[in-house]
Amino acid sequence: SDHDRRSFPADKLNWESVAAFVQFDGHRRLMEITLQPLSLGFRQPRTVRGRPRLADPALGKEIIERLAALSAPFGTDIRYQDGVGVVVIKP
């Protein structure tokens, strides 16, 4: 990877993710989906890379906004709110 300057280690998108949390009511209806933005350690030392950590606020907003833009063509509405992504559940 040429000292992390090419391929997988050099692409920031490979080091960002979300953890999805879903909530259902007592009738198995989907009530809420929240997305917690995560960092996997882009440009961090190899000893700490790959371990999911909560993304800092600026990176978290960037991750959620990118995911929202990618999801919009499929009719999925994701909003950044209080540090997490919230998927708007349509009735």
Image (cartoon, helix red, strand yellow):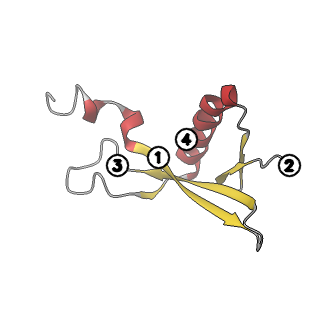
Q: Amino acid at mark 3?
A: Gly
The residue drawn where x is 23% and y is 50% is 45
Sequence-first tag of 3 and 4: 3
Q: Nearer the viewer, residue 38 or 3?
A: 38
Q: Amino acid at mark 4?
A: Ile
Please state if 6 lies on the left or on the right of 16 as rendered. Answer: left
Q: Amino acid at mark 2?
A: Pro
Which residue is at the far front? 27
Sequence-first tag of 1 and 3: 1
In space, the residues marked 1 and 3 are separated at their CA atoms by 11 Å
According to the picture, the residue beneath numbered tag 2 turns out to be 91
Q: Residues within 10 Å of mark 4 (few under 14, many from 20)?
A: many
According to the picture, the residue beneath numbered tag 1 turns out to be 17
Sequence-first tag of 2 and 4: 4
The residue drawn where x is 60% and y is 61% is 21
Q: Amino acid at mark 1?
A: Ser
Which residue is at the far right? 91
According to the picture, the residue beneath numbered tag 3 turns out to be 41
In space, the residues marked 1 and 4 are separated at their CA atoms by 7 Å
Q: Nearer the viewer, residue 19 or 59?
A: 19
Sequence-first tag of 2 and 3: 3
In this view, 32 is above or below 25:
above
Q: Nearer the viewer, mark 2 or mark 4?
A: 2
Quadrant the N terminus occupies: top left
According to the picture, the residue beneath numbered tag 4 turns out to be 63
In space, the residues marked 2 and 3 are separated at their CA atoms by 38 Å
Q: Please, what secondary structure does the residue beneath circle 4 have?
A: helix
Q: Please, what secondary structure does the residue beneath circle 3 have?
A: loop
Q: Residues within 10 Å of mark 3 (few under 14, many from 20)?
A: many
